[in-house]
Image (spheres, rainbow, N blue to C red):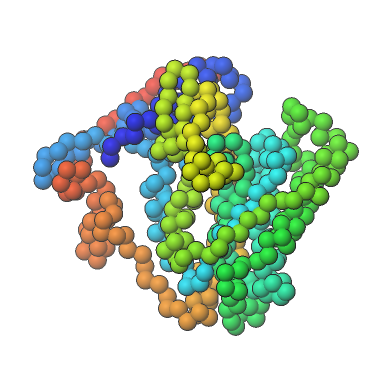
Amino acid sequence: MARLALEVADIFRTHGPHWRQEQHGHLSLGQLKVMSAIEQCRSAALGGHSLQCPACDHLQIAYNSCRNRHCPKCQGSLARRWLEARQTELLPVDYYHVVFTLPAPISALAYTNKAVIYRLLFQATAQTLLTIAADPKHLGARIGMLLVLHTWGSAMTHHPHVHGIVPGGGIAPDGQRWIACKPGFFLPVRVLSRLFRRLFLERLAQAYSDGQLQFFGEHAPLAQADAFAQWLEPLRRSEWVVYAKRPFAGPAAVLAYLSRYTHRVAISNQRLVAMDQHMVTFRWKDYRAKGRTRHKTMTLDADEFMRRFLLHVLPRGFHRIRAYGLMANAERRNNLANARALLNQPAPAPPVAPASSPTATAPPSAGLRPATFLCPHCGASMIIIAIVARQHLPRAPP
């Protein structure tokens, strides 16, 4: 595979060492680990394999990936494997895309309270959808959903929001029938927005009472209970953004959408345009503009580019893809089997990787191990002839 002209790794390798020194004591251990992983990804530092094609004798070295979930180069294979596992879970119904966004004041507070506020965002979103869908005035059914956390805007600013993929219907409370949504309509957005606002603020106030929130800088005065209560008041009256898109055009479109959203990072290498000694230029989309003027380029100081990228490093162990309701992991298999029975749909066949996939050159029934590396010249399976050892870099003193 041809290497892109410019990658995020190039920016960190070029400008990262000096910026680390300038930001000493201000970068978290997680952010430092992400920088190091991206810099070393698919380089001699992580080792690799020497490959040879038995058909045309082409030689190639394949370096190991860092497999960090924030690395732009390591998400493609993870997304493909995840999507193959999801193929058998799609139902023959319309699917809707909903977006729940936090207001700017809470987004600013979330940066120093990521684990708490992102968790509340997931919980309030899921409870909102489950509650409104279960109300007989709206749908009167138990639904399922897949939620994906994004913390960035197109310009890499901090913009926490949750994307939800929801089947257009659910199982009746008695479990005896499938209740479908009205054609082209999922749930009323205004009702979702009001309940989401109330549930999130209730949970946020409870987290404050439990001492789970930390306040720094301009938010330091909020450590006082009266100041925090006063800070919450405008948020109780403001409009919270909840967006619902029209249904997808079939299950294939759902998978295509998921492949673009589930394993995204703050910026992909394809959006990078140029880098010099001080600045980085990249493409971004201005959603406030219309037509061709929506697609623009932005030039940032390299230090600011790295700062924005690292804004979106998630807390260790935090899951950014979560399932609720009928799709919750504990009962997913039974719930989906019940839904298929109510929809008169046969059980799906086990997923088989397409023949064009680089990781599958023979059907599973052949009893052959799928090829991992394919020759870029003739397409034959390459064999490993040597192991490239990792380069152990000297560790700096603590």
Q: Based on the displayed image, in which of its 4 quarters is residue 217 positioned?
A: top right
Residue 38 seen from this side: no
- In the image, residue 81 lies at what x, y percent? 39, 54
In front: 371, or 163? 163
- In the image, residue 156 lies at what x, y percent? 55, 36
Q: Based on the displayed image, in which of its 4 quarters is residue 117 positioned?
A: top right
Residue 68 against residue 394 in the figure, above or below: below
Q: Based on the displayed image, in which of its 4 quarters is residue 273 positioned?
A: top left
In front: 318, or 156? 156
Residue 391 seen from this side: yes
Q: Residue at x 55, y 63 (%)?
A: 246
Q: Is residue 48 left or right of residue 7?
A: left
- In the image, residue 152 lies at what x, y percent? 57, 40
Q: Residue at x 47, y 73 (%)?
A: 92
Extreme residue toward the right, this view: 226
- In the image, residue 104 lies at what x, y percent? 70, 40
